[in-house]
Amino acid sequence: MRPQPALSKVLDLALREGPGRDAYRTGAAIALGDLARAPADWNDFTTQARDVGYTHACAVPLRLRRQTLGSLLLLSATSGPLPADDLLVARGFADAATIGLLNSRTLEYAESVNEQLHTALHSRIVIEQAKGFLASQRRIPLNTAFEAMRRHARQHCVRLTTVAHNVITTGQLSQPPNTPPDNQRPPTPHRTTSAPENPPKARPPNDAPPAAESAPAAGPPTGR
């Protein structure tokens, strides 16, 4: 159930100032009581809380030993402060919530560690199997087979477990993405250079244009 917009604004301000913030910061209960006598540095929180209709506020920390996780904010719209018995109940709720949160964190951490260990163990088994298979296939020592797999993984930027899976399933080291096998690669074209068929004629010295050839002019026939 979502709180009303006005209460949501009070809770948002409580994260930055007010008894909840002070209880979390100091690790001690804040039993101020009447908001009319709240400290000046609670001004925004106090104003918003009183506008909504709350008259009293206090807070207890969510703390176990030296570790503080948060705080429990208590708001009241009555004419009097929170009774002492209610404050004791609030402390009990805060202690129970703290223990529950810490146990949840411990459980999540344990599950995360177990999952990481399981993944690491499974990967190691696959790598060992691939190393033995490759060593047997190529008749090389186990250390040499492992170095070949690791070198292949580094050269092609793939995980070592990926290379190991490929060795087990295909019997050979994996090819990089979008790279055909060696026997299917097209031959590399060889470039050849040849002289032009009609090389340009050499220009005369001093870049002078060649002299134009002229035929003798035809004249009147000469008599003998």
Image (tube, helix red, strand yellow):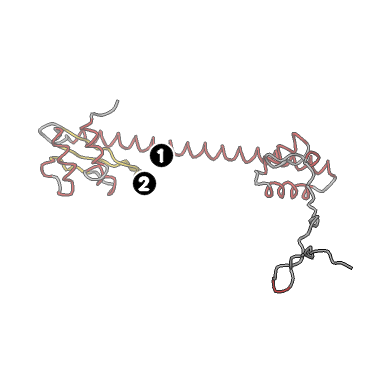
- Give the residue at mark 1: 102
Residue 102 falls in image quadrant: top left
Q: Are marks 2 and 1 in contact (CB under 8 Å)?
A: yes
- Give the residue at mark 2: 67
Q: Which is more toward the observer, 20 or 46? A: 46
Residue 201: percent from left, percent from top: 77, 63
Q: Quadrant of the C terminus?
A: bottom right
Residue plotted at (34% across, 35% down): 97
Q: CA distance from mark 2 to mark 1?
A: 10 Å
Residue 194: percent from left, percent from top: 81, 55
Q: Callout 2, which amino acid?
A: Gln
Local packing at callout 2 (Cα closer than 10 Å; few below 14, some 14-19, many 20+) is: few
Residue 220: percent from left, percent from top: 80, 64
Q: Residue furthest top?
A: 1
* Secondary structure of the residue carrying numbered label 2: strand
Q: Callout 1, which amino acid?
A: Leu
Residue 197 falls in image quadrant: bottom right
Disc number at residue 114?
none
